[in-house]
Amino acid sequence: MEQPSLNRTEQLQEQLKIVKVESPWRIAIRRFAKNRLALIGLIILFLMFVLCFLGPVFSPYELNQTSVKNKNLAPSAEYWLGTDKLGRDVLLRVMLAGRISLTVGLVATAISVVIGATLGAVAGFYRRFADTLIMRIADIFLALPTLPILITLGAILSDLKIEPSKRIYFLMLIIGILGWVGLARLVRSQILTLREQEFMQATEALGLRDSRKIFRHLMPNTIPIIIVSATLGVAGAILTESALSFLGLGVVPPTPSWGNMINAANNLIDFRKRPWIWIPPGVCILVTVTAINLIGDGLRDALDPKMKSR
Amino acid sequence: MKKRLSLMLVTLMAFGSILAACGGGEEAASTDTTTPTETATDTTTPDETATEETGTDSESAIGFTEATDVATNNDVALARTDSAIIGTVAPQGVFNPLFHQTSYDYYVDYLVFPSLTKVKTDGTYENDLADDIKISDDNKTYTFHIRDDANYSDGTPVTASDYLFALKIYLDSSYDGQADPLSWNIVGGKEYNEGTATDISGVKVIDDKTVEVTVSDYDAMTQVNLGGVTPLSEAYYGKDYKQGDVSSIKAFNGKPMGAGPYKVTKYTAGQEVDFEANEGYYDGAPKIPKLIYKVTTDTTNLAMLQAGETDLDNITVNEDNVEELKATGFLDVDILKNNGYGYVAMNNNNPLFSDVKVRQALTYGLNRAEVVEAAYGPYAEVINIPQSDVSWAYTDENIDPYDYDVEKAKSLLDEAGWVEGADGIREKDGKKFEVNFSATADNPVVDALIPIMTENYEQLGIKLVVETLDFNAIMEKKDKGDYDMFFAAWGLTPDPDSTVYITDGAQNNSGYSNPEVDALYAKGKKELDINERKKIYAEAYQKINADAPEILMYQRTNMLAINGRLDGWDISPYKDFPLSLHQVEIAE
Amino acid sequence: MSQYIIRRLLQMIPTLIGISIIVFAISQMVPGDYITASQNPNMTAERADQLRALYGLDLPPVQQYFIWAKNMLVGNLGDSFQHKMPVTEVINTYVWNSFVIAFATLILSWVIAAFVGVFSAQFQYSFFDKVVTLLVFLLMSLPSFFIGLLAIKYFALDTKLLPTGGMTTAGLNASGFEYLKDVGLHMIMPVAVMTTLSVGGLTRYFRTGMLEVIRQDYIRTARAKGLKERTVIFKHAFRNALLPAITLLGFELPGLFGGAMILERVFNWPGIGQIYLASLNLRDYPLMLGFTMFLAVLTLLGNLISDILYGVADPRIRLK
């Protein structure tokens, strides 16, 4: 507003740069860096990580230090976020929980996005046999009852005497593997239309390799939907983790996670009388999901081939 | 979307297990009078959550608290002048005492199907449908006389042949209910079961109201088992019954008909069961003409009581809930000892735990009082023998309370040859003392137990590796013998007979074996005199206490909240509320 | 097209066989069976064996599978162990209760999500868009039972506008309109909460779909032609933004009958969700397997329908 002249120069510079022919990745990075909201998201997420991974170091309390006489205390100078029903410091727990939840949320989602997007794209692009095969497998995955499978896996891990503390890796893998189907079908449906569009005829004419067609030309167009799916997935994975813990697949109870902290407040009385039990983990999930979404929106704008300006 | 769906499935699990466990296990155990054995039900965790949180310690916390100010009663409740609404977990619709599986179906059957005898508040039995029971000198022949005024709700009399008919269903080869009728040793029962006889030779119908049952072998449970049978109207149920196929009987599960104080007028699955008084009930027509069992859940059952939408419900026992309920002023609060106990099992066959000193050390070295306090506050108590302290068989004479004592635990471990290694972990013959511990999650006890136990045992120089698992997965590890320690709970039947601590007993989870205990249990089962039995079981409990085959943890409580407008209850840990419903009246 | 449909229907056969084998295998691997899970207090080893024989649980798994599969072909899913009645009857008793609220939720959430998504896209980064976005994330950050409790607290306990739960008022002996009114009143809260929960994700998909389309050349052309904005958005853009939505719609079909387990419990709604869950926990295999297969068929049909709808929505897609 204030200095239209400056804006003009910027625009000019930008046009000049385009003339210089930048690689698409550089364009994307530059676009992203200019997206203020996306940067804020990135910073918030970074701060969450710092808080969760470094914060506990400064806490005067210990994880397994229970003290029944201090149970259910409201926030105070001593316990900034109060204590839970075993008298444990909520602040410390929420920070430690973040280590688990952030990791699980991001890694599990990444796994399901990679599998889902790749398989979806391959199915949509090749159609016929590949499509039939992949989509029928997807059908089977959708139709299988999740819970009995998880119970069985939990029992198997236990029988194999896998260290409970290592089971978190299996947990991420399992949530990731369970989650790919939805995205695969979404990506496939997009690719089905995209491959009939004119620009694909151009790639055909240019004689590009299939992998190049899929990953360079088709996939970028599905980025928006992938991002929506991923942001929804992070929240889902964080909340799911706590449920899987019950089955011997996740963290063991004294180890906190945002999911199991929020699940601990499962009655009306906690709800009304002790908001400090559930608000902190709830807010952490909210902030994380929002930050990831801001980053996602920024990424989408940065990677979207249809966005010509900015 | 689907993804979310499947994830939800999982989340549910937490809740789900609550339901299931409740349904199947502990509850049924504690109420089923027909059962010979003790039980182990475990239920574990989930169930506990459903029903409770309990407390310990101060006796004053447990017991009956009368409504303080009935005048504040809710108009919604007061408007029901001829009916009462009882909140309950959903029954499964199996309304037949031979087949029901959950205590919620049982709640319905209590009102519709009386049996020959019924349990009293102290856990012993008295006559109900029967007005006379004669036992032969050899204790093998039981003659029951059914009350002359006992009629079904359709007006037809309850007869001796209906009793025989019920026994035939029990002994049918296709019978798949909870009872184990072959273990009652009725003469000719096995032949009927196998189809080689069309009648049960040991059961004689003497006249319309008299039946004589002969058993090949007797024990203390024989009379309880035979008296626990509910005569089924053969005219109503038996039309299409053929030996070897009870499906025609099960077809009536949704339309029960019995001689009890109430009759079912309507059942809507998952929602409610409606009852109407059976005016011809032999013990006098019930004082409340209409009853409704309404399905509630523990998320809102307390709020519904407060709002007057229900008159009675089981509420999870914890300090918050007790406080809320008492604050209303118009609710009676009855906190009852639960017939059961929680324990940490140790695999006695595992070299780690084969030494009694180690087992004792692990008991001394665990601060059980703190765990119980953290989990249940004043509403549960640490126990030291596997019996409810309200049972006639309970004793605290010569029982070691195993008070928390780190030094004693350490010295016991030293004596057993486990010495501290360089890393602070005890070892013996080059083997580290490392224990795998499995527990179900989402249980107030486990939440408190795991951190405290880990810390306590670390002090002793023992490394505890904890995992949380699905309940059935833990039970399977137990069955395979592939475990070190796990947490579970047993339900108790009113009779102290049990197979939990006898060598290779059906419910023996820990592999514990002590010939002396075996002999005492066998003797107790065969003895019919209650005073003699008391002594026998006291001795058995003392031995078990000394052997510490498992770490006994706590006995929790259950809580009934009842609108103050209903009076005349006779409720105890053994006698569930439906058993006195027919004498309850609405106060003016 | 009809050829395509026939081929897909034929493909369902091997897929279903595959699913049935896997599902059955899982049921065999899950720890425990009905006998152990029911935790009967007086169960002796002999009695357990008798019951297993009675239920056919003692047969070799392969034989059990074929018996089960054969019965299924003639529509017999067996008897539920815990309910002691045919599985089809159990499902029939509870599934419609679930369907009623799921269907109402489906209609409401799709209508709302379509409108909100479209406006949110049209006015991207506006105040409205930001509020909607934040709200969506807020709802996603809390477990569903939590939102259910919140609703109960405000609408049932505090203001007493709505019943706390259940499907009918206890002791109500009404029929016809009175009955429908009562059920309708009880439905409001569960449907509202379920809608709130599912509308969030859907809105995001609609918004993204619209954002994509709005930027495309033909929309610019349409606007340039001077068409009314409403026509541009709803007639031209919306149709093309539907594609992802169609995929999601396919997933809704099994959801209609699957039951919402957590919320059914919170609202005490007598649906199939809790029944299914109990069947799992009690290892009531006939019920668990029967219901799983029922949902499997619906899942396959749902995906088939969405594949067919792609072709209708975008004629460029050639399904082969």
Image (spheres, rainbow, N blue to C red):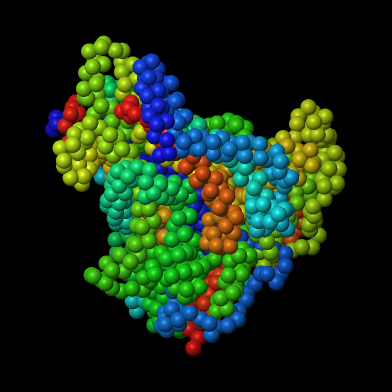
> Is residue B339 at all visible to an observer of this figure?
no
Query: Which residue is painted at 32% across and 42% down in the image?
Result: C121
- In the displayed structure, would residue B379 be above or below residue B24? below
The residue most toward the top is: A207
Residue C2 occupies quadrant: top left
Q: Where's residue B363, x and y in %? A: 76, 48
Nearest the eye: C65 or B345: B345
Q: Where's residue C194, x and y in %? A: 37, 53
Nearest the eye: B10 or A297: A297
Q: Where's residue B329, x and y in %? A: 57, 78
Query: Which residue is painted at 83% across and 34% down in the image?
Result: B420
Query: Which residue is painted at 52% across and 77% down in the image?
Result: B563
- In the displayed structure, would residue B178 be above or below residue B119? above
The residue most toward the left is: C2
Q: Where's residue C204, x and y in %? A: 36, 42
Nearest the eye: C49 or C185: C185
> Is residue C318 at all visible to an observer of this figure?
yes
